[in-house]
Amino acid sequence: MPPRDGQDDEAGKSRPGTTSPSRSITTIDAAIAHCANHCNHPVPSPGFIPSRLLFVGSYDDDDKVRVMTRAEFRKSTTANGKCDKYAALSYCWGPPGDALAQCKTTRNSLPARLKHVPGSELSPVVRDAVAVARRLGIPYLWIDSLCIVQDDVADWEAESGLMGAIYSNAYVTIVGLNSASCRVGFLAGRADWPYLSTRSTSTTATNNKEEMEEDVNEKEEGYDDTNTWQFAAALNKARWSTRGWTFQEKSLSTRLLYFDSANVHLRCANYTFRDGRAGPVLGKQPSIFEHYGHSEEETALSVTESWRNVLVPRFAGCLFSVATDKLPAIAGIAKHFGDVTGYEYAAGLWVPCLERDLAWSCAPQHLCLEDLLDALDPLEERYIAPSWSWARAPGPMERLAFLDIPSSTTAHQSLEVVAEFIKADVGLVGSNPYGRVSGGKLVVVSKIMPLVAVEYGKVIQNNDEESWFELDWIVKDDELEKLPAGLEMVTIGSYTDWHGDGKGRRKVYGIVVHPVGRLPGKYYRVGLFNCCHVDGDSWLGFESMTLRMIEII
């Protein structure tokens, strides 16, 4: 365990090059209060309380940490008029060996955890989070390892599905950027930490409101944002920023309190506060809970476009210690979007938007077609999602992007959907419709034809440079003219792509499929195509082909 820092320094003094230690938490506390009272961030589930919380008490309750149920929390806060706010911790468990050493709640340990969690059992990162919550005067803390029963599948499924409410309703989310593992704390080595002991009173926080607003105005008057840029660099380099679970926690949190090696930063959707001073908008934390639209249709369009164009491409590049956590790790965001739109969800895709959500592509991850087919087999232990879902890959996906298809409501750019989606079903591992899946099928009726090519990315009947297809495995040069038999192109639809010269070109797009050898009549999705009409007329004979039904798994 890393040693606690700075205990031998003379109290009240700061080291050169650091922020004033006596100011840091007191002004950050005021900044949090300012944000809570004046930023008016939307919260999807106001009044929500997690099923369990960790009671950490105050700084005088050094060994009184215990797990508390929701019922006990409400009874305690109602009867005594105590603080009903809780903080949440976002952190990395670390490699498997470190994760095994993490202090957890299990079915066997739950009765004892409800009475007491010895401080000696807490991992360094949890111990530091407890210390920060106490300094801020927040007596309750949510930490996944202790507030979810880790060996209870039903409890894990239920609680992971509540991540949206847990993190968005937390008064603040604590993040230690220097901690890449639960066995590494984030306060060690900080010169200012021993002195961060005085919490501001309500009067101080109120008086600081004007200071906060003055700082906000200063950012437009040459505010020195050097530290903000340094913070952004530290954020980008941190292992915390590369993990799938922490991506969701960051996206869901209303405000985040970051500890890096030199400063404390508070981020919300409006500002970045560094030790109480408001920084430039550059460093703000975008909110997924702000949707714009004059109608339900416009709001749904905004939400699903944000899902495809912003959230999923970023999330797809994240890392996971357990590959099958991919869908659960974005389930909180998905549930919120599902609540907003009312749309049915299927393994990372929105069923009413399949004509767009199916049109994704990424850098190939498999060395050959056989390797890809093995990974897509639902009988494989590493199975994550159906072949038609972007979530299917076990590792981070490079260059994941969705085809830029104009909105069907835009004049002269209407989307014409050719495919009829008969069924989009997934088999759930648990009860969470946004969680893990054991399989899935997509039944489609459309116009289908064989795929043939003279070179990778070009369709043989059309030499137009804007016509292409992409396959999901690495195609070697000597394989370009002899692609595997059985590849077919399934049309999804067509749209008009307008150029700067004002000339519109009609394009046909869809997915490439390959038959499942052991399951006749079933197919895997293995690629994407996007091609122009030839001379504005029939394209590759699609329009003359009869409709056919296939099942993609």
Image (cartoon, helix red, strand yellow):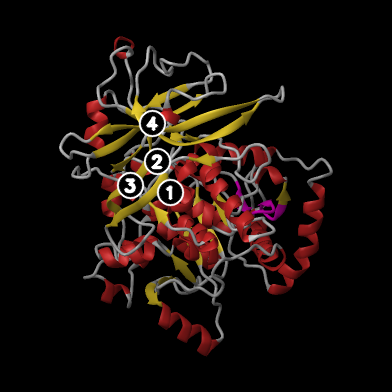
Residue on which disc 1 sits: 349
Q: Nearer the viewer, mark 3 or mark 2?
A: 3
Q: Position of residue 22 (x, y in %)?
A: 65, 58
| Figure quadrant of residue 70 | bottom left
At 26% across and 21% down in the image, what residue appears? 484
Instruction: Tell me the SS state at disc 3.
Output: strand
Of marks 1 and 3, the one in the foreground: 3
Q: To which residue does mark 3 refer?
A: 443
Q: What's under tag 4, amino acid-wise?
A: Met
| Image marks 1 and 2: residues in contact by CB distance under 8 Å | yes
Q: Which label lies toward us, 2 or 4?
A: 4
In primary-sequence order, the first of circles 1 and 4 is: 1
The span from disc 1 to disc 2 (Cα, nearest Å) is: 8 Å
| Tag nearer the camera, 4 or 3 | 4
Kind of residue sitting beneath label 1:
Leu
Q: Which residues are magenta?
A: 263-277
Up-down: is 76 above or below 286?
Answer: below
The mark nearer the N terminus, 1 or 3, is: 1
Identify residue type, mark 2: Trp
Q: Kindly report the distance in space between the C-alpha atoms of the residues bearing marks 1 and 3.
A: 15 Å
Q: Is residue 268 magenta?
A: yes
Marks 2,4: beta carbons within 8 A: no
Look at mark 4 in the image and give the residue it sits on: 545
Q: Which residue is mark 2?
A: 390
> In the rendered view of the protein, which quadrant contains the C terminus?
top left
Q: Nearer the viewer, residue 126 or 457?
A: 457
Q: CA distance from mark 2 to mark 4?
A: 29 Å
Q: Residues within 10 Å of mark 4 (few under 14, many from 20)?
A: few
Disc 2 packing (10 Å; few <14; some 14–19; many ≥20) = many
- Give how far apart the Cα atoms at labels 4 and 3 are: 19 Å
